[in-house]
Image (tube, rainbow, N blue to C red):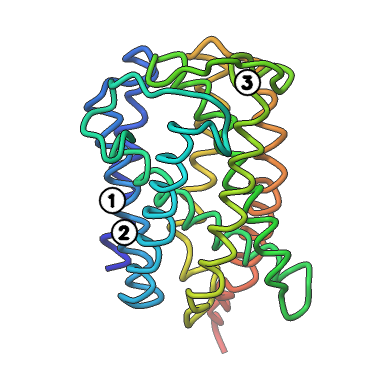
């Protein structure tokens, strides 16, 4: 099942590589990318923590994301006033079905990345630190996501100001709402999903790789293909606060665990 998760994630990478050559992605490519990555997250959760963990992930991230978005489009709370344009396909409660799947596909890496980094900074870990860092880890991704989706016309904001410097068209209320929802989501997941057995550097390689790929590809896409260099710069800093330490600590952990080859003796 871990191999299947890796294959699904790899398929999503191939699909996403076509985005820059289709003016940001067609509906078919977007659907394929989200379905593959959310599938990879659920399969990896089941493979590494058991079927119950996969069910919890879908219920908390998918269900929680759906509820937050359904409330958001009707009331403007907690993200601000926005509306979907109907271009993302089938909808549930006024929310495209792809949206809760997108929450699922990134909430899982956010939880595991936060646990990984906190465990290296706080002996014994800290649920509060995991929730806070996980909220930032998940919200940072939206610095890249929201501008891309707005530019493609998938949703619009009634009042996009004030916003982050360089991230035009997206109000600060959106990111505040993401932080709030992500904080609750990661805190519940952290409480209900077990740590899992085996070395995290190997066990959680797929979600770690997904997060790092999302970071690096998003920086490149906005800087070169999507015409949003300021978003690339801001996102590189905001998401990089998590992605760079993850890349460094993960690489060091894997290098320390690599078997040392003893050279063969020649002669007597």
Q: Is disc 2 placed on a helix, strand or loop?
A: helix
User: Residue 14: x, y in percent?
Assistant: 31, 35
Q: Is disc 3 placed on a helix, strand or loop?
A: helix
Q: Which residue is mark 1?
A: 8
The foreground one among 17 and 143 is: 143
How far is disc 3 from disc 2 in space, using C-alphas?
A: 30 Å
State the residue at coordinates (28%, 27%): 88
Q: Is disc 1 placed on a helix, strand or loop?
A: helix
Q: Residues within 10 Å of mark 3 (few under 14, many from 20)?
A: many
Mark 2 and mark 3 in contact (Cβ < 8 Å)?
Answer: no
Query: Where's the C terminus, which quadrant?
Result: bottom right
How far is disc 1 from disc 3 in space, using C-alphas?
A: 28 Å
The mark that comes first in sequence, 1 or 3, is: 1
Query: Where's the N terminus, which quadrant?
Result: bottom left
How far is disc 2 from disc 1 in space, using C-alphas?
A: 5 Å
User: What mark, if any, has residue 115 been given in the picture?
Assistant: none
Q: Which residue is mark 2?
A: 5
Q: Residue furthest right?
A: 122
Q: Which residue is mark 3?
A: 231
User: Residue 108: x, y in percent?
Assistant: 47, 58
């Amino acid at each position: 099942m871990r191999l299947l998760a890796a294959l699904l994630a790899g398929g999503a990478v191939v699909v996403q590589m076509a985005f820059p050559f289709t003016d940001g992605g067609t509906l078919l490519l977007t659907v394929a990318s989200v379905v593959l990555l959310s599938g990879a997250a659920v399969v990896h959760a089941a493979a590494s923590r058991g079927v119950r963990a996969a069910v919890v992930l879908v219920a908390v991230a998918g269900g929680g994301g759906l509820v937050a978005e359904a409330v958001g489009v009707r009331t403007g709370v907690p993200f601000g006033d926005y509306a979907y344009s109907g271009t993302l396909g089938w909808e549930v409660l006024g929310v495209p079905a792809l949206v809760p799947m997108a929450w699922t596909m990134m909430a899982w890496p956010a939880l595991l990345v936060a646990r990984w980094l906190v465990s290296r900074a706080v002996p014994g870990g800290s649920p509060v630190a995991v929730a806070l860092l996980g909220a930032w880890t998940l919200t940072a991704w939206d610095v890249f996501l929201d501008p891309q989706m707005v530019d493609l016309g998938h949703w619009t904001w009634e009042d996009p100001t004030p916003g982050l410097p360089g991230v035009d068209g997206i109000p600060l209320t959106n990111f505040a709402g993401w932080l709030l929802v992500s904080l609750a989501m990661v805190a519940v997941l952290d409480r209900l999903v077990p740590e899992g057995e085996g070395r995290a550097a190997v066990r959680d390689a797929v979600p770690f790789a997904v997060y790092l790929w999302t970071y690096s590809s998003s920086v490149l896409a906005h800087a070169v293909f999507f015409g949003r260099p300021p978003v690339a710069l801001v996102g590189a800093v905001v998401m990089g606060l998590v992605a760079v330490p993850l890349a460094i600590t993960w690489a060091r952990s894997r290098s320390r665990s690599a078997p040392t080859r003893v050279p063969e003796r020649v002669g007597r």
